[in-house]
Amino acid sequence: MRPLTEQDIRSSFVNCSKGEAKRLAVPRDLGERPWADLDFLGWRDPGAPDRSYLVTERGDRLVGVALRYPSSQRGFLHRSMCSVCLTTHRGGGVSLMTARKAGTAGREGNSVGLYMCTDLSCSLYTRGRKVPDSGMRIEESLSLEEQIARTTGNLSAFLDKLYV
Ligand SMILES: [Zn+2]
């Protein structure tokens, strides 16, 4: 994806208020992110451990999503698979993230859940640039391009649900 600025990021959120988008913690190392290898920018909020965010491109538009995950689920010891990049992790490597829906549905309290790599590094796992600490990726018969298309397709299917 193309490199993003703090302003790009703050103006991209579709499921939180403008005030929240203005205040949330944007990574300070935007200049050092491996943009060419990212399908989306994902990060944890250092000041609010139950919050994560992701921003991705859809067509010529940016879509930012605020995610939450319950603190009680950290430390799980079973193995689980990320539904975006299909990497399997042990421990807390995969979390059930929830996103408030966009628009009226979100304001009425509706949300969508997704099992996803807790560190939001799906793009790097897909490309083999990061290996799970304890876990594995399934044996792939797909080419790297096909795996990337699958990851972005899975993410896109999740984003669609925010608008239903
Ligand atoms: Zn993942």
Image (cartoon, helix red, strand yellow):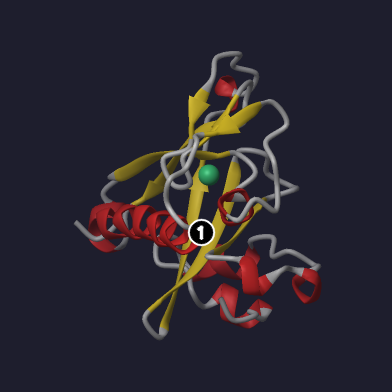
Residue furthest top as drawn: 77
User: In this image, 85 relative to 3: left or right?
Assistant: left
Tell me if the residue at label 1 has its CB under 8 Å from ligand 1.
no
Give the camera-side residue of 113 and 115: 115
Q: Residue at x 49, y 71 (%)?
A: 18
Q: Measuring from the top left, give residue 48's x and y in whole percent.
A: 68, 44
Q: Mark 1 points at which residue?
A: 144
Q: Residue at x 43, y 45 (%)?
A: 141
Looking at the rendering, in which quadrant would you find the N terminus?
A: bottom right
User: In this image, 153 relative to 49: left or right?
Assistant: left
Vertical placement of 160 versus 120: above or below?
below
Q: Measuring from the top left, give residue 136's x and y in whole percent.
A: 60, 31
Q: Which residue is drawn at 27% across and 59% down?
A: 160
Looking at the rendering, in which quadrant would you find the C terminus?
A: bottom left
Give the camera-side residue of 25 and 1: 1
Q: Measuring from the top left, give residue 34's x and y in whole percent.
A: 71, 68
Instruction: Give residue 4's quadrant in the image.
Output: bottom right
Crowd around label 1: few <14 · some 14–19 · many ≥20 (10 Å):
few
Give the camera-side residue of 104 and 98: 98
Q: How many labels does the image show?
A: 1
User: In this image, 31 relative to 87: left or right?
Assistant: right
**Please, what is the three-letter code of the amino acid marked with disc 1?**
Leu
Q: Measuring from the top left, give residue 120's x and y in whole percent.
A: 60, 48
Residue furthest bottom as drawn: 60
- Label 1 sits on a secondary structure element that is helix
Residue furthest front as drawn: 141
Vertical placement of 58 versus 70: above or below?
below
User: In this image, 13 relative to 35: left or right?
Assistant: left
